[in-house]
Image: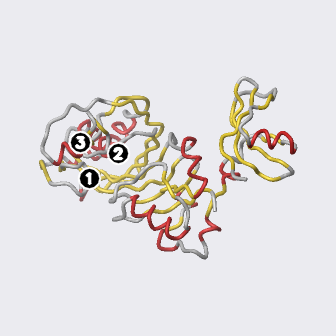
């Protein structure tokens, strides 16, 4: 059982909780390509068996989120879970549709973002949230992120909040983005709700709630390693070259540098990498 299963994470679970449950269901090694906070819901790709060897090809995927931003309140964690640090009156005019769209669109492109203090980024060997829990001050360096698309979905003036969709690069903190958007609107705010709807090519439509996954149906929901790399070109090896390949011997191939699917006798063997006209093994399933 090797490949990827896309879980539609429910609120309240940690990514570790879900990994443990899927490991029990599959009886295989299980890993993930990036966590979701317990309060967040949506797409959580899990790597199963030898699918865990594919993690290096999946870690830098872009992501898409649906977000609800609540204005007028600042929280310690930047999300629903935190303590209220500050409250202020919000002028309803800033929630005019045109104004919200202009502010959102101003975040398009590459920029620097300061990660939230309640995050797992390490500074001097300690995670930021460890400093935060002890009330310690620490300098947080900004990180480069890219916002590829950001669209307003709806406005709820009565509750001083609005929903938007954002597609962004790996490493983007939506909690920080929400606080930055609120600041640019002339107020304060926090991330009230978060749903991840896409990770790379994996979408919410491909996902299954953890509650619906079991030993009987898990295999039908697994995306195989072969299908994961379906857009790559193939290399067919005869028996002699296959044995050399499996033994780690580099083989001469007049091909462009890149990743290739490896076959022998129409059987999928795994993934190989060509560099400087030499093919070497990378992921072997056989």
Location of residue 109 in the rendering, given as x and y in whole percent from the top left corner: 44, 30
Q: Residues within 10 Å of mark 2 (few under 14, many from 20)?
A: many
Under tag 3, what secondary structure? loop
**Above or below 215: residue 13:** above
**Above or below 146: residue 212:** below
Q: Nearer the viewer, mark 3 or mark 2?
A: 3
Viewport quadrant of the N terminus: bottom right
Location of residue 31 in the rendering, given as x and y in whole percent from the top left corner: 49, 54
Question: Of the numbered discs in the image, which one, if any, rests on residue 79?
Answer: 1
* 3 or 2: tag closer to the N-terminus: 3
- The image quadrant of residue 186 is top left
Under tag 2, what secondary structure? helix
Location of residue 237 in the rendering, given as x and y in whole percent from the top left corner: 84, 42
Q: Can you identify the residue that label 2 sits on?
A: 174
How many numbered marks are there?
A: 3
Q: Which residue is drawn at 18% across and 45% down?
A: 132
Question: Of the numbered discs in the image, which one, if any, rests on residue 43?
Answer: none
* 1 or 3: tag closer to the N-terminus: 1
* 1 or 2: tag closer to the N-terminus: 1
Q: Can you identify the residue that label 3 sits on?
A: 117
Location of residue 221 in the rendering, given as x and y in whole percent from the top left corner: 61, 65
How many angstroms separate mark 1 from mark 2 (CA)? Answer: 10 Å
How many angstroms separate mark 3 from mark 2 (CA)? Answer: 13 Å
Considering depth in this image, is 53 or 225 the residue closer to the camera? Answer: 53
Give left or right: position of 165 versus 221: left
């Amino acid at each position: 059982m090797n490949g990827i299963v896309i879980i539609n994470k429910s609120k309240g679970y940690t990514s570790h909780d879900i990994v443990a449950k899927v490991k029990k269901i599959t009886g295989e090694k299980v890993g993930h390509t990036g966590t979701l906070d317990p309060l967040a819901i949506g797409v959580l790709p899990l790597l199963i068996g030898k699918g865990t060897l594919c993690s290096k090809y999946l870690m830098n995927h872009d992501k898409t989120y649906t977000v609800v931003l609540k204005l007028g309140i600042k929280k310690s964690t930047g999300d629903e879970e935190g303590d209220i640090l500050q409250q202020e009156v919000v002028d309803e005019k800033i929630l005019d549709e045109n104004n919200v769209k202009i502010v959102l669109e101003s975040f398009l492109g590459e920029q620097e973002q300061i990660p939230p203090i309640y995050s797992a980024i390490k500074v001097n060997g300690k995670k930021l949230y460890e400093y935060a829990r002890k009330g310690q001050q620490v300098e947080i360096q900004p990180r480069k992120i890219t916002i590829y698309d950001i669209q307003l979905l709806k406005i709820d003036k009565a509750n001083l909040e609005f929903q938007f969709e954002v597609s962004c690069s790996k490493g983007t903190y939506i909690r920080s983005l929400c606080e930055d958007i609120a600041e640019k609107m002339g107020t304060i705010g926090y991330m009230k709700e978060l749903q991840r709807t896409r990770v790379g090519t994996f979408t919410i439509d491909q996902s299954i709630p953890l509650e619906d996954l079991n030993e009987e149906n898990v295999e039908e929901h697994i995306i195989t390693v072969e299908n994961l790399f379906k857009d790559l070109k193939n290399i067919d090896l005869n028996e002699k070259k296959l044995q050399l390949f499996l033994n780690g011997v580099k083989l001469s191939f007049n091909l462009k540098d890149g990743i290739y699917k490896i076959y022998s006798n129409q059987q999928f063997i795994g993934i190989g990498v060509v560099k400087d006209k030499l093919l070497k093994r990378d992921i072997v399933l056989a």
